[in-house]
Amino acid sequence: MVPVSERTDQVTSTEADAEGDPAANPETEATETDGGTTSEAGAGTTTEARVEAELEPETGADGPSDRPAVETGAGSIAHALEGAGVEHVFGVQGGAIMPVYDGLYDSALTHVTMAHEQGAAHAADAYGQVTGTPGVCMATSGPGATNLVTGIADADMDSDPLLALTGQVPTSFVGNDAFQETDTVGVTRPITKANYFADDSETVGDTVGEAFALAEAGRQGPTLVDLPKDVSVGETDHEPDSPELPQYYEVPEEADAAAVEEAARALASAEQPLILSGGGVTKGEASPELRDFATEHGIPVVTTMPGIGTFPEDHDLCLSWAGMHGTGYANMAISHTDCLLAVGTRFDDRLTGGIETFAPDAEVIHVDVDPAEISKNIHADHPLVGDAGAVLDQLAGAMGDAFDAEDSSSEAYAAWRERCTEWKAEYPMDYPTPDDAPLKPQFVVEAMCEACPEDTIVTSGVGQHQMWASQYWTFRHPRTWISSHGLGTMGYGLPSAIGAKVAAPDREVVCFDGDGSFLMTSQGLSVAVRENLDITVVVLNNEAIGMVRQWQDAFFERRRMASEYPWLPDFAKLAEAFGAKGLTLQEYDDVADTLQEAREYDGPAVVDAHIDPAENVYPMVASGGDNAQFALSEDQL
């Protein structure tokens, strides 16, 4: 095992030997089969093999294992994944990864062959967000591995649990510019929580297990194991242990008790407290604790965009999400609070705007499992390092004594709650729908939300459509909003919908995409059709990269360079060509029936919704601006 890089929330670390021993792993010939990959257990089982498997006696859960004995490094990898509880793998076959796929052939794992490696990474990313455990993606060496990079970087920016397995040329060829050789470990070092170059068939299974464990521990994130072909085909009978964290890795649980008491007193003495709920609340399964704390003390809640769903948006205390395109009332609350309890957020620039104007009068309490995030962007007056749920429980337990010490109670927050309610009325999220104007995207989003169950999973690409989806859908539960936040990856929507549906086959999945984003990964429709995934894609089609066009109009004197897309295909016909259901939507009167037809179709459906090409996203805070100075129209920018 060679851990090449580790970028984690660990307390202590040790240096690892990065030198492999090629001589100890002579290249051997891989056994090829004529079986392709399918979505069934046993990725690529031939008819004869299936018949033989059916004739074999079954064993119960408590009986002897019916898994084949480990004979190669690839077999050890398959055992490690099964031991980690992995059920689905997303990937694309190729030369250097072929032995690993062969190791999956007789495994219980279900492989989903994607149409592009980037899609495999995004699908695995979404799978991990929905389930809370790492999604797994696979690709071959060279271009296969580099095609995963965008998805890995996306998971890194959003702290999503992901394990990437990449094929590599034999160790004796490494460094010789062999066919499809790329320094995958070097390329991915800055965008992984930890990555490994596997150099031994005997230990490769344990390496994969450790990478899986690291991906989901503490502050979650992507890990990668690079698998040279000779290591995968090399002989071994070692069955890997259950996934284990390295001994040096420690995850903080509870925050310092004295610091918690001081933070509780800051809240108790405040008149205008506010909770900021970030994506870490979802990752830490801390939504129940946050809801209990907010409702117990009547403290208004604002979320970050990754934190959407951590607090029910139909609750009286919820002010929705803040930042560049957040609600006016959320940004007003942040700008006027005197005590900000921020949980599981890294205070990125799309949230804060200008650092000097963000929550300028607030005493800041920052709860995070990763100490590296404390005071990185916004100074924390009360740093609380620990698990989000555990720290919120600590705060809840300390509030009684804190109120006594400050001779106060949560009744002191009543005037502040009323002020937040007034901001809701002053800056409503409404929009005109004149009969003589093109279809408004907000109307389409709201109509779909009203038609769908409240536990529907919503995915999106990146752009104006992403903002409208997050602004006008009412989210009530965590893990129902799946999007690309930190990296802002166009094309994320469709493959993430595939991953979400595989993770939650009994729940409805809706993808809001833009025409520019959908065009980048529309080949994923072939996967959705083959797997018969019942997902609905709504393309909010304005024949442009809308957010770029909006910025060009606002800040570049309407010089629309390379942002308008008048040459787009008919997306409904494109969907039909892939074997999906294709529908076109242009009129208000057709919205309800068209969306219902798409939802009722048993399989993937695409609605090409032609929306007002002049519609823009508001509110909007200019980049680096003051959140309290949000614009409601272009002339206010």
Image (cartoon, rainbow, N blue to C red):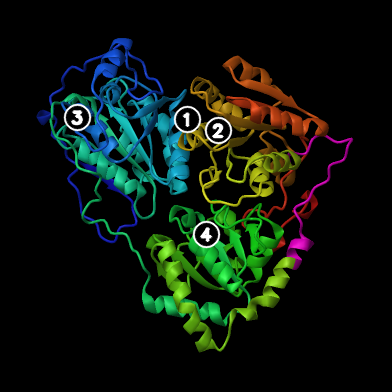
* Residue 621 rendering spot, x and y as whole percentages: 67, 55
The span from disc 4 to disc 1 (Cα, nearest Å) is 28 Å
Q: Which residues are magenta?
A: 422-441
User: Counting other residues with Cα less than 10 Å from the Cα at mark 2, is it few (<14), some (14-19), or many (20 or more)?
Assistant: many
- Magenta segment: does it hold 195? no
Of residues 167 and 474, which is closer to you in this image?
A: 474
User: Counting other residues with Cα less than 10 Å from the Cα at mark 1, is it few (<14), some (14-19), or many (20 or more)?
Assistant: many
Q: Label 2 belongs to which residue?
A: 491
Residue found 29% across the figure and 36% down from its top: 81
Label 1 vs 2, first from the N-terminus: 1
* Magenta highlight: main SS: loop
Above or below, comparing residue 290 to residue 488 in the picture:
below
- Magenta segment: does it hold 436? yes
The amino acid at mark 2 is Gly
Label 4 vs 1, first from the N-terminus: 1
Above or below, comparing residue 576 to residue 587 in the picture:
above
Looking at this view, name the residue that lies furthest to the left.
24
Q: Are marks 4 and 1 in contact (CB under 8 Å)?
A: no
* Residue 446 rendering spot, x and y as whole percentages: 72, 43
The amino acid at mark 4 is Phe
Q: Secondary structure at mark 3?
A: helix
Q: Secondary structure at mark 4?
A: loop
Above or below, comparing residue 135 to residue 276 in the picture:
above
The span from disc 2 to disc 3 (Cα, nearest Å) is 35 Å
Q: Secondary structure at mark 2?
A: loop
The span from disc 1 to disc 2 (Cα, nearest Å) is 9 Å
Label 3 vs 4, first from the N-terminus: 3
